[in-house]
Amino acid sequence: MSRPGPGGMVPGNGLGFPPQNVARVVVWEWLSEHSRWRPYTATVCHHIESVLKEDARGSVVLGQVDAQLVPYIIDLQSMHQFRQDTGTMRPVRRNFYDPSSAPGKGIVWEWENDGGAWTAYDMDICITIQNAYEKQHPWLDLSMSQMNRQTRRRRRLRRRLDLAYPLTVGAIQSSRVGPWRSSGQALLRARSVRVGQRQRARLPRHPLGRRPERRPARPSRAPSATFAGTALWAAPAGSPAGPRRPPGAPPRSPSAPSGAPTPGQNNLNRPGPQRADSVSARASIPPGVPALPVKNLNGTGPVHPALAGMTGILLCAAGLPVCLTRAPKPILHPPPVSKSDVKPVPGVPGVCRKTKKKHLKKSKNPEDVVRRYMQKVKNPPDEDCTICMERLVTASGYEGVLRHKGVRPELVGRLGRCGHMYHLLCLVAMYSNGNKDGSLQCPTCKAIYGEKTGTQPPGKMEFHLIPHSLPGYADTQTIRIVYDIPTGIQGPEHPNPGKKFTARGFPRHCYLPNNEKGRKVLRLLITAWERRLIFTVGTSNTTGESDTVVWNEIHHKTEFGSNLTGHGYPDAGYLDSVLAELAAQGVSEATAKA
């Protein structure tokens, strides 16, 4: 169903915009992680178009028209979709199609996924299917199913009538919201900025959306932005200039020889040049101009790179001098190490620890566990129980909700080591709702009674010495820890028992200096691993994915040769901070196993 048919995208001019005074259907699309442009629904596209007419540089809150898109916002200035809860950014584009095509008629073709839900085809495929359907092409299976020729698997498909996509007539309002090409790259605004002055001169717009050819820039009118080592500063007087592009000729491709970029050409995501070129480009940046690192604008990325990139674009738009530079990449791994160079860690027996599925401990009656660590209080003070928020002199708030023989709702006890007081029934309820491993943790001061264990899935922990030094520890070798946890099924101690959990990014490599304190941390990490405290199953703070393996409040250094992400070296206070985190989990040197 990939054959072309009529009713496709309207042909545009040199910049990809439709010609003037021609009716066309507008479809907004976003770039998926599989590099496919996925269409928004017609309702969402109507909403985006209405916001666009009011403010071409504004933002669109998609949750106002679709409850499933509540976290998402589209920034029309940068043409990116932003997810507020995870910080993920994806490029968007505005495409145009013939009014007689499927989106102009409100026809949507969908296929049934494994979960039984219906998923819309990409817009070009939808148009191709509709054209074949109208002409009754023999290669279209009219049984309303699709088949994978390799696996012979069939899926149902359907044709659904929906709201027609918005129709527009006339010239495009602004090239900032023109359609993005399949590369999904951002557009760096072509304008000249006077260095040190808050003035800018925009190029006049061509009636068809093309920009006229830029005249040779004078030294005093040099642009004030660079990116990826490619200087946008005008060449000084007397320097050789590149050949002029004749009017109407296509813009120079990113692989063309370096030089001043052509107006309107994308400079944000071009591949970085060689080291010598970047050094010479940085040398051409005038003094006093701040450099703003832009880490990643090639599609998805965390929120702080997005803010850095958008800040640079806004500064350029305001006429302020700024230099956009590509931030250095973190050094995550050491140089390759042969097996003969890998040695055991002195003072730490073995090189590997494995954990299996949790074996439920017997004879751990909640009432017996609570009474083991508490002392009965005959005359409790008139203050709140911080679990149920009822007064200690009254019955527990769990009266009538939880029943245990021998535990009266008015009984109050004091924890032996920290002295905090609670209703016994409240502590029984708290223990029953936890890991039920025979340990108890004070909800006020977090003191741990007994041996705390976690919900870490089964896996393997390896540790050894490698002949390389960490930044800040030049005289010592490095302890490398390798965690490996496979995908599996959640157990009764996990959020969704019986459901599959994912394990992204494994094996994970972590690093410690091979000194006395580093080996102490390693011994405690081994104890924490055996108690299943290093990882847990939950929701990732980075990607927002649920039912996946995540870190469990014990920070590790995963960046070997730099500290650009905050998870590397040098970090003088890391070893002390991780010892404190281990102590908070009940793992101390006194309890570490030899």
Image (cartoon, rainbow, N blue to C red):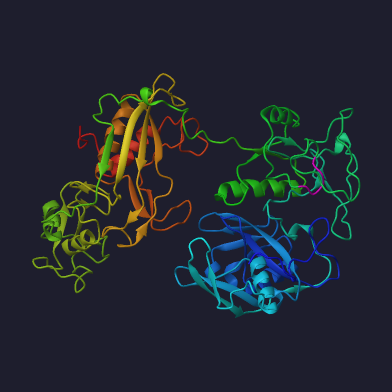
Image-based side of 449 in relation to 179, left or right = left
Q: Residue placed farthest to the top in the image?
A: 475
* Residue at 67% in and 40% down: 271
- Residue 236 screen position, x and y as percent: 85, 30
Residue 29 horizontal side relative to residue 410, left or right: right
Above or below, 262 against 15 in this view is: above
Q: Is residue 501 left or right of residue 149?
A: left
Where is residue 214 shown, x and y percent of the image?
Answer: 88, 45
Work out whether residue 66 can be spotted.
no
Q: Which segment did they paint magenta?
A: 261-265
Q: Is 134 or 567 nearer to us in this picture?
A: 134
- Given residues 433 and 522, the one toward you in this image is 522
Residue 534 in the image: x percent, y percent? 32, 44
Task: Give me the residue at 30% from left, 45% from top.
Answer: 459
Residue projecting furthest to the front? 138
Which is more toward the observer, 363 or 113?
113
Classified by dominant secondary structure, the portion drawn in magenta counts as loop
Kindly identify the residue that appears in the image at 49 percent across and 65 percent down.
152
Quadrant of the image occupied by residue 432: bottom left
Locate the C terminus and report the quarter of the image it occupies: top left
